[in-house]
Image (cartoon, rainbow, N blue to C red):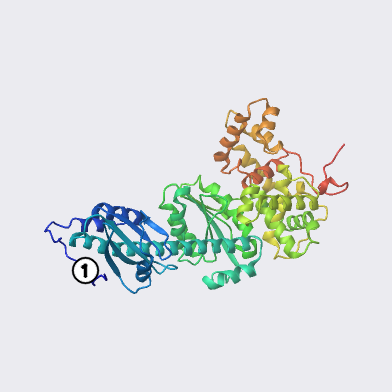
Amino acid sequence: MAGREGEGRRADGADGVDATWAQELLDHLRPSGRDVRKVVAWLADAAHADVALQDDTGALLAGTRTPLDEALVADITNGRIASAALQDHGRHLRLVRVDLPHPATAGVLAVTRPAPFDRRTADIVTHTAGVLELLLRARESAAAGQRLRRATSDLRLAILQLLMVEDTVSARRVAAGLWPGLLDTDTACVYVAESRPEDRDRLAEECLAATSEQALVVRCPAVDSHVIVVTPGEAAAAELRALVGGRPGTFLGGSARQSLAQTATAYGQAVSALAVAHFRPDKAAVYAERTHPERLMDPAALRDWAARVLRPLDALPHHTRAELLATVRLGLEFTAVNAAAVLGVSRNTVRARMERVEGLLGTDLSDLTVRAAVHLAMNTQAGLDQQPGGHGGADTRLADLLAGPALHTWAGELLRRLDSDTRNLRRTLRTWIAAGGNAERAAHLLGVHAQTVREHVRSAEPVLERQLLAGGSDLYEVVLAHLALGDLDQPALHGAKPGHPDAPVHG
């Protein structure tokens, strides 16, 4: 009953017929094959038999279930014998032990046919058992590798989410186990690479290779075409640019260098730069490469104004304040759904935090001018909170910050780009912003169709080199440009409390 070691390794059968079956069986080991069920089906056809592959619990793994002697099966799976051959009620059976991956120990390949087993058929069964073992081991190794890759990817995302809410201590602690030294830095840059969604996994692997795994590479949970890279080193920028330059349909946006606690701010900058990259021949852009309105304002006055706008949040515990600020910064950049995905919370949580900040600041975040002002205040405080306070006037208003000649020139040059279009894109854009970015309301005010409004706004994007319909930093810069030129009413902050510097003037 027991099988002999090395049995059935001849190339030809006892009847002298060439064993072409050997080549057919080897074909199942090619990368395009490697399917246990197909191998079992092939064996059934080659041996003119019913074939079953089951594990040590009797569970059928492939083939057609066959009644078997449980005691004999137990002897094989327990290792007492390696194989067995018997005749039972007109059936001829061959049972061969097949080692299985953990947690199972061994299984049985059972081949049942009405005719006796000749040497050729016995050879086929023996070799097929060996092929099945190889395939099962390879499948388990692949599954284990996939589980490891998934766990590693989840861990990278968890670290990013901790950085997004300024919990750098926990982020470093989590990273230290697998990537020692990765976050042993005070500052870092964030890059966002974009490709087609179906190419993103390969892009992520190439980003890991390009940065020699010395960067935090995360598949963005909110946008399925984005890969987020947090890197402390300077060399990664050149490597990522080279990577993008050699791939069609791939773009790269990078942030200015920020402290680790300001990863959320850096992420927003990278996404903003990514929008510009779409209009660049080298398909890459860095946030600092573009003139931004806050750089043209008096820094001391801007810092004091931002501190005053956000002062209602100062009484909150540090962790709560950081959590709210991080959430609102992302909520101002993206939809609630996308912000929730990046932070790893529900969209209702994002909305609740936004509403809480809205209540504390006493303002209306559905107003685009208010959103632009709060966005400016939050990013200013995030970028300057390590610097000493300025001596700006206590009554400095947003209008005062926007009144400087340099900023007025910047705003005029930016919006004048739209004047050459005969469709009056500038009027449409101004009306759309005043309507809170709502195409239907803007269309009603202009007396046109809502689709026309959307087309005009979309047409303005490449002219201004900014994404507008998606919202976020690009749109807020354009809003500030309108405010600087007096094309929009100044936003009401702190609930338009009487006497507050940012309260609108009536009468």
List x then y, in percent, for residue 448: 64, 26
Residue beneath label 1, please?
A: 7
Identify which amino acid the numbered label 1 is placed on: Glu
Q: For the view shown, which residue lies furthest in the left direction? A: 16
Task: State the image quarter where residue 390 is shown.
Answer: bottom right
In the figure, is residue 505 to the left or right of 132?
right
Few, some or many C-alpha atoms within 10 Å of disc 1 (few <14, some 14-19, many ≥20)?
few
Q: Secondary structure at mark 1?
A: loop
**Residue 375 vs residue 439, the one in the foreground:** 439
Q: Is residue 450 above or below residue 71?
A: above
**Residue 495 vs residue 406, the one in the foreground:** 495
> Does residue 419 show up?
no
**Residue 266 vs residue 36, the one in the foreground:** 36
List x then y, in percent, for residue 455: 58, 32
Give the residue drawn at x 12%, y 58%.
Answer: 15
Give the residue drawn at x 61%, y 67%.
Answer: 171
In the figure, is residue 239 to the left or right of 481?
left
> Does residue 498 show up?
yes
Give the residue drawn at x 74%, y 46%.
Answer: 365
**Residue 400 vs residue 465, the one in the foreground:** 465
In the figure, is residue 245 to the left or right of 258?
left
List x then y, in percent, for residue 335: 64, 47
Which quarter of the rendering shows the N terminus? bottom left
List x then y, in percent, for residue 345: 65, 55
In the figure, is residue 149 to the left or right of 255?
left
Which quarter of the rendering shows the C terminus? top right
Q: Is residue 437 above or below residue 95?
A: above
Give the residue drawn at x 23%, y 60%.
Answer: 124
Q: For the view shown, which residue lies furthest in the front direction? A: 89
